């Protein structure tokens, strides 16, 4: 018998050995090993993008809102990111109107806030989101008003003048109070967006040390909201801002969530903090409107699914917030709105996000998960209601069979021809289609 085994091995054939272990399962989930808690998934509609939505018919508006926030018809987003305005009224389309457009007479003068109850239609969308069940509203400022800065302009970078720090902190808190009067609780507040990038639109510079210092001014004033910092231009760059805050005990006391974008650098590991972290803004480069799932463009649905997977499993992020929900022209938003033709189009990018956001709910915990085939990118979660969600992105060109799904399960397939299409799980077996994202929900 031993000679036969050796001979078969030399021929490249499997040896006959009854004690040989079975092949490992395609996917393994270890529920005993827990990672980060999930805060949610979301979008931003800052810079007056909601006005595009308002230009459509009420029926079309409802269809888009359903696609963003409804858990049966769409993505079931659970976070809405709002832009805090810095420009005077009557500014060009890409600017947000300020609640204090004019200098009140100096940093120590009584403020002269103005509020129209609309905020570039952000209030309307926030109220709609709340009606769908959204509870996280993240308000973020791209810049202080120009008169508070050393360049006298809300655009083109510049820095916050030291004497205006407290007035700027009060300005931010006043914004949250205006929303509270409209019935919307701002849960998360940011004072800077891409502080390491000078843009021709609203922008303002902070070094990591300056950001940590300003946190100590804002924190004691903004006690009823979670402070967020610092929305750096890239994930690697965000690490310096997180490290500066973590190194200062007083700053660390106030910052509850650390955030970064992934334009300058992708997620390549966790931020250096034990606090929750968010990938709070990104969309891929490109110069055309694209609705494809898998065309190699770098801004198709498969690309977005891969980015979300990496953020969750490599970066241990608790939230993923995409830029934007809808825009116009050659946008890489989830949707394109033509406010002249009164039409809209939906990309597969939306459905890539929806495969995660509809099923992985706030309060879920990521579980340890692995795959035998390196072409499978897998992540797993347990929701507060006890349901489990296993996300499998098959980046290969061949289907893979997973045998051994435990519990009452439904699979949802997203690929070129499907957008969260239900697929039966028969005999505890799921076929993971090639170049597809399969979401398995076990109850």
Image: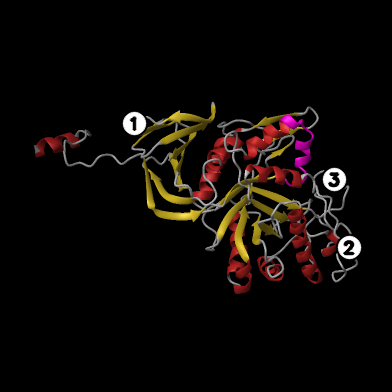
**Residue drawn at (81%, 68%), measured in percent from left and top?**
164
Q: Splitting the image into 4 quarters, where does residue 249 fall? A: bottom right
Tell me, yes or no, whether the two marked residues, 2 and 1, touch with CB atoms within 8 Å.
no
Above/below status of 112 relative to 429: below
Instruction: Identify the mark nearer the N-term, 1 or 3.
Output: 3
Q: CA distance from mark 3 to mark 2?
A: 20 Å
Q: Position of residue 353 (x, y in %)?
A: 57, 40
Q: Is residue 429 left or right of residue 219?
A: left
Q: Quarter holding the C terminus?
A: top left
Find the magenta span and give its range. 46-59
Tell me, yes or no, whether the two marked residues, 3 and 2, touch with CB atoms within 8 Å.
no
- Identify the element where label 3 is drawn: loop
Neighbour tally class for label 3: few under 14, some 14-19, many 20 plus, Cα within 10 Å? few
Q: CA distance from mark 1 to mark 3?
A: 59 Å
- Identify the element where label 1 is drawn: loop
Foreground residue among 8 and 139: 139
Above/below status of 292 relative to 202: above
Query: Where residue 427 is drawn, which disc sits there?
Result: 1
Q: Nearer the viewer, mark 1 or mark 3?
A: 1
Q: Is 53 contained in the magenta span?
A: yes
Q: Is residue 13 left or right of residue 288?
A: left
Q: Position of residue 85 (x, y in %)?
A: 79, 53
Mark 3 lies on residue: 92
Q: Is 430 contained in the magenta span?
A: no
Res. 412 visible in picture = yes
- Identify the element where label 2 is drawn: loop
Q: CA distance from mark 2 to mark 1?
A: 69 Å
Mark 2 lies on residue: 103
């Amino acid at each position: 018998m031993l000679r036969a085994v050796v001979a078969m091995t030399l021929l490249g054939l499997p040896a006959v050995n009854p004690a040989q272990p079975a092949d490992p399962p395609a996917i393994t989930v270890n529920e005993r090993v827990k990672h980060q808690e999930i805060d949610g998934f979301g979008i931003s509609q800052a810079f007056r993008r909601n006005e595009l939505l308002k230009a459509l018919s009420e029926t079309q508006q409802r269809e888009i809102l359903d696609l963003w926030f409804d858990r049966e018809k769409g993505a079931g987003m659970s976070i809405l990111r709002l832009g805090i305005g810095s420009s005077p009224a009557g500014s060009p389309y890409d600017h947000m109107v300020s609640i204090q457009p004019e200098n009140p007479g100096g940093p120590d003068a009584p403020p002269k806030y103005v509020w129209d109850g609309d905020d570039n239609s952000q209030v309307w969308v926030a109220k709609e989101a709340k009606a769908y069940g959204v509870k996280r509203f993240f308000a973020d400022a791209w810049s202080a008003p120009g008169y508070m800065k050393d360049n006298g302009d809300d655009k083109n970078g510049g820095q916050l003048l030291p004497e205006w720090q407290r007035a700027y902190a009060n300005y931010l808190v006043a914004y949250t109070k205006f929303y509270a009067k409209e019935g919307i609780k701002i849960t998360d507040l940011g004072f800077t967006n891409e502080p390491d990038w000078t843009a021709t639109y609203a922008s303002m510079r902070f070094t990591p040390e300056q950001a940590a210092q300003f946190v100590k001014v804002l924190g004691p004033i903004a006690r009823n909201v979670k402070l967020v910092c610092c929305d750096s231009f890239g994930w690697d760059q965000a690490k310096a801002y997180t490290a500066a805050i973590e190194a200062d005990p007083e700053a660390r006391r106030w910052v509850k969530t650390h955030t970064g974008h992934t334009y300058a650098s992708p997620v390549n590991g966790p931020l250096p903090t034990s606090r929750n972290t968010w990938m709070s803004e990104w969309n891929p480069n490109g110069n055309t409107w694209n609705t494809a799932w898998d065309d190699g463009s770098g801004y198709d649905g498969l690309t977005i699914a891969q980015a979300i997977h990496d953020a969750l499993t490599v970066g241990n992020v608790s939230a993923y917030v995409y830029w934007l929900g809808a825009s116009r022209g050659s946008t890489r938003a989830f949707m394109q709105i033509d406010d002249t033709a009164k039409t809209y189009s939906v990309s597969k990018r939306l459905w890539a996000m929806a495969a995660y956001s509809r099923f992985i709910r706030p309060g879920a915990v990521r579980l340890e998960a692995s795959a035998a085939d390196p072409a499978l990118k897998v992540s797993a979660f347990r929701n507060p209601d006890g349901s489990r969600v296993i996300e499998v992105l098959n980046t290969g060109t061949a289907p893979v069979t997973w045998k051994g799904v435990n519990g009452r399960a439904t699979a949802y397939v997203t690929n070129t021809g499907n957008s969260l299409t239900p697929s039966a799980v028969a005999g505890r077996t799921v076929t993971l289609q090639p170049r597809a994202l399969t979401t398995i929900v076990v109850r």
